[in-house]
Amino acid sequence: MLNTMWPIFILLSFSYAIFSGNLEALNKSIFESTNNAIKLSIELLGTICLWNGIMQIANKTSIINKLTNLLDPIIRLLFPEIRKNKQIQKEISMNLIANIFGLGNAATPLGLKAMKSMQKENLKKDTLSNSMLVFIVLNTASIQIIPTTVIAIRNSLGSSNPTKIVFPVWIATILAAITGLLGTMLIIKFSRKK
């Protein structure tokens, strides 16, 4: 769908610029936006490298085990199907920890790894298990204590207070997670009755 929409938007933009006499403004904006994109990418790369490095160090120490133990009661409650599989629990914990620290780019590969492990345990390979559904919702809601990526973007765009969004992010992500989990649990409960 996006493969169709983006070319249409680009063609409409060029057509409008040509017919309205704004071709020079379009050219200028193209070069400015590519310049801004490169600057933003470099700034985000630094943030991503820093936090990925911290996660790698934490993974090689006992910190991850302590955080995993801290999340263990929540994981047991939300993922009853995988109570006995400590490896999957650790992978889910790593993903949740990365999301909590606002490391969306670091959380993605960890989430994919957890999904692959859950798929191996899944009896119906063509259908998502309940644990997989809950994990997708929880990962999408992405509860964040430190939204590092958003702070980095705001900082790169010259915000006078880039951390001002921390409290609203807490509210939004916690409410999204609670709403998503309640909805998912209801769907799971009603689908079992059928």
Image: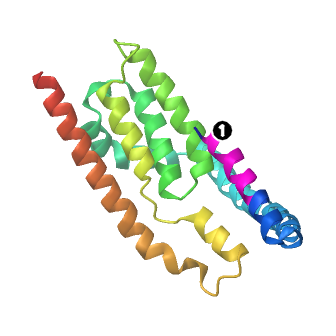
Residue at image point 37% right, 30% down: 132
Q: Residue at x 50, y 52 (%)?
A: 99
Q: Residue at position x 57%, y 41% from top?
A: 108
Q: For the residue marked with disc 1, what is the amino acid?
A: Asn
Q: Position of residue 68 (x, y in %)?
A: 42, 44
**In the figure, 148 relative to 89: above or below?**
below
Identified at 21% across, 39% down, the residue is 185
Identify the image quadrant of the N terminus: top right
Question: Height in image: 11 above or below 31?
Answer: above
Q: Residue furthest front?
A: 19
What is the quadrant of the C terminus in the image? top left
Magenta stretch: helix, strand or loop mostly: helix
Where does label 1 land, which residue?
3
Q: Is residue 169 visible?
A: yes
- Rate crowding at label 1 as few (under 14), some (14 to 19) or many (20 or more) other CA atoms within 10 Å: few
Q: Report the coloring of the rendering.
A: rainbow
Asked if residue 8 lies in the magenta stretch, the reply is yes
Q: Seen in the image, is 152 located left or right of residue 119?
A: right
Q: Position of residue 17 (x, y in %)?
A: 79, 65
Element assignment for label 1: helix
Residue 172 falls in image quadrant:
bottom left
- Horizontally, residue 154 falls left or right of residue 74, namely right
Q: Quadrant of residue 13?
A: bottom right
In the displayed structure, would residue 91 be above or below residue 192? Answer: below
State the image coordinates of residue 146 (x, y, percent, origin top left): 52, 66
Residue 66 seen in this snapshot: no
Q: Which residues are magenta?
A: 2-13
Q: Indicate the position of residue 111 as horizontal and vertical percent values.
A: 51, 37
